[in-house]
Image (cartoon, rainbow, N blue to C red):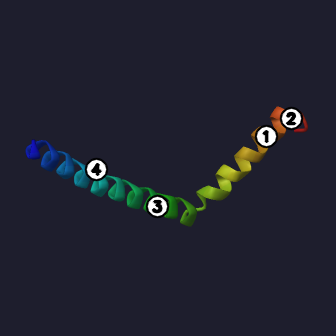
Amino acid sequence: MNKGRKTNMAGAGYRRWLWALLLAAGICFLGIGIWRGEAQTVWIKAIYICLECIGIG
């Protein structure tokens, strides 16, 4: 009965580290994108798409 708990706890620790690693990678890639100026490009494209949907542009 305890074996299941130990395995479950080990799996939870693994998931927590994996989640933290993926979060750190996501933040890193987000920072790289902002540094390269990609945020401005995405913002401009979003504005154009929005204006086209409304029918102004």
Do labels 3 and 2 touch, CB within 8 Å? no
Which numbered mark, 4 or 3, is in the foreground of this view?
4
Residue that badge 3 annotates: 27
Question: Which residue appears at 30% of the width and 55% of the height?
Answer: 16
Residue 39 appears left or right of 33: right
Quadrant of the rendered image containing residue 21: bottom left
Check the image and report above or below for 43 versus 36: above
- Which residue appears at 35% of the width and 53% of the height? 19
- In percent of width and height, residue 18 lies at 29, 53
Tell me the number on the disc at residue 40. none
Callout 1–callout 4 Cβ contact below 8 Å? no
Mark toward the start of the polypeptide (3 vs 2): 3
Q: Which of labels 2 and 4 is toward the front?
A: 4
Distance Cα–Cα, label 4 vs label 3 = 18 Å
Instruction: Name the element at disc 4.
Output: helix
Q: In which quarter of the image is residue 45?
A: top right
Q: Mark 4 points at which residue?
A: 15
N-terminal of the pair, mark 1 or mark 4, is: 4
How many badges with numbers are in the image? 4
**Residue flagged by tag 4: what amino acid is it?**
Arg
CA distance separating discs 1 and 4: 38 Å
Q: Position of residue 31 (x, y in %)?
A: 51, 64
In the image, what residue occupies the spot 39% across and 61% down?
24
Quarter of the picture holding the N terminus: top left
Q: How far apart are marks 3 and 1 (CA)?
A: 27 Å
Label 2 sits on residue: 54
Contact flag, marks 2 and 1 (Cβ < 8 Å): yes
**Which residue is identified by label 1?**
50
User: Which circle's residue, 3 or 1, is located before the other in the chain?
Assistant: 3
